Image (cartoon, rainbow, N blue to C red):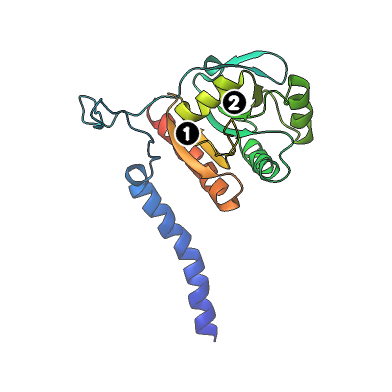
């Protein structure tokens, strides 16, 4: 019994050491966040640069209004890594779970000004500036980091579909509706680098991990 206990203790000590050695030796080559949505030509063929690297689409520019009634655009996210989701404030279940998960992301990067969160309403006709401000306060959102946006509905839906590749839900009525459980990770060049289920603790853990990997990528590219 004592030998087994000694063996277990030895393994507990040695395993973290081996993990550290592996990451230190191979981590730079094996940990990289992939890109999404490659650029294509008229024939649907993927485009590459002169080095043979895949070219990826960038998220289109936009101009919306935040919870402080200030114009907010892609320019406000320059040199930032950001996470975006689409929601509406009277969503009873899904959006609330997603907002609670975004609190985790906010807390993880509270002291890192290069990380931002962006929540865009899909019901701008109901979610006014004052409504968004109240919603933000319910989640103790740091609105210097976490931005709640409203604006023209057509622009919001165009941004969701064309910029972030989110599908509309068929309603059977005159208008389709945007309702998504996805978080989307965007890098400093405005390219999508990850898509996650916003109600899944496991997926949000992966989001936080991949933000760290992106931060590491940028620190090594300086």
Q: Residue at x 79, y 28 (%)?
A: 134
Viewport quadrant of the N terminus: bottom right
Q: Residue at x 45, y 27 (%)?
A: 162
Query: Where does residue 160 sit, x and y in percent of width and height?
Result: 52, 29
- What residue would you read off at disc 2? 113
Q: Residue at x 34, y 49 (%)?
A: 25
Residues at marks 2 and 1, CA–CA distance in whole angstroms: 12 Å
Label 2, residues with CA under 10 Å away: few <14, some 14-19, many ≥20 = few
Q: Is residue 135 left or right of residue 57?
A: right
Query: Where does residue 195 sit, x and y in percent of width and height?
Result: 48, 41
Q: Secondary structure at mark 1?
A: helix
Q: Residue at x 37, y 34 (%)?
A: 37
Viewport quadrant of the C terminus: top left
Q: Disc 2, disc 1: CB below 8 Å?
A: no
- What residue would you read off at disc 1? 215
Q: Secondary structure at mark 2?
A: loop
Query: Where does residue 174 sit, x and y in percent of width and height?
Result: 59, 30
Choose top left, top right, bottom left or bottom right for residue 216. Answer: top left
Label 1, residues with CA under 10 Å away: few <14, some 14-19, many ≥20 = some
């Amino acid at each position: 019994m004592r030998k087994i206990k000694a063996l277990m203790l030895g393994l507990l000590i040695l395993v973290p050491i081996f993990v550290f050695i592996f990451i230190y030796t191979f981590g730079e080559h094996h940990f990289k966040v992939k890109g999404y949505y490659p650029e294509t030509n008229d024939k649907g063929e993927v485009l590459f640069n002169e080095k043979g690297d895949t070219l990826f689409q960038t998220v289109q520019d936009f101009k919306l209004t935040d919870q402080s009634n200030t114009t907010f655009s892609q320019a406000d996210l320059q040199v930032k890594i950001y996470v975006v989701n689409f929601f509406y404030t009277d969503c009873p279940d899904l959006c609330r779970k997603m907002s609670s998960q975004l609190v985790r992301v906010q807390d993880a990067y509270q002291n890192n000004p290069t990380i931002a969160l962006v929540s865009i309403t899909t019901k701008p006709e109901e979610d006014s500036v004052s409504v968004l401000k109240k919603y933000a306060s319910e989640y103790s959102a740091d609105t210097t980091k976490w931005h709640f946006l409203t604006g023209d509905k057509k622009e919001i839906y165009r941004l969701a579909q064309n910029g972030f590749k989110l599908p509309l839900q068929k309603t059977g009525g005159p208008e389709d509706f945007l309702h998504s459980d996805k978080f989307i990770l965007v890098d400093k060049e405005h390219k999508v680098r990850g898509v996650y289920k916003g109600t899944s603790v496991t997926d949000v853990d992966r989001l936080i991990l991949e933000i760290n990997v992106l931060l590491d990528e940028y620190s090594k590219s300086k």
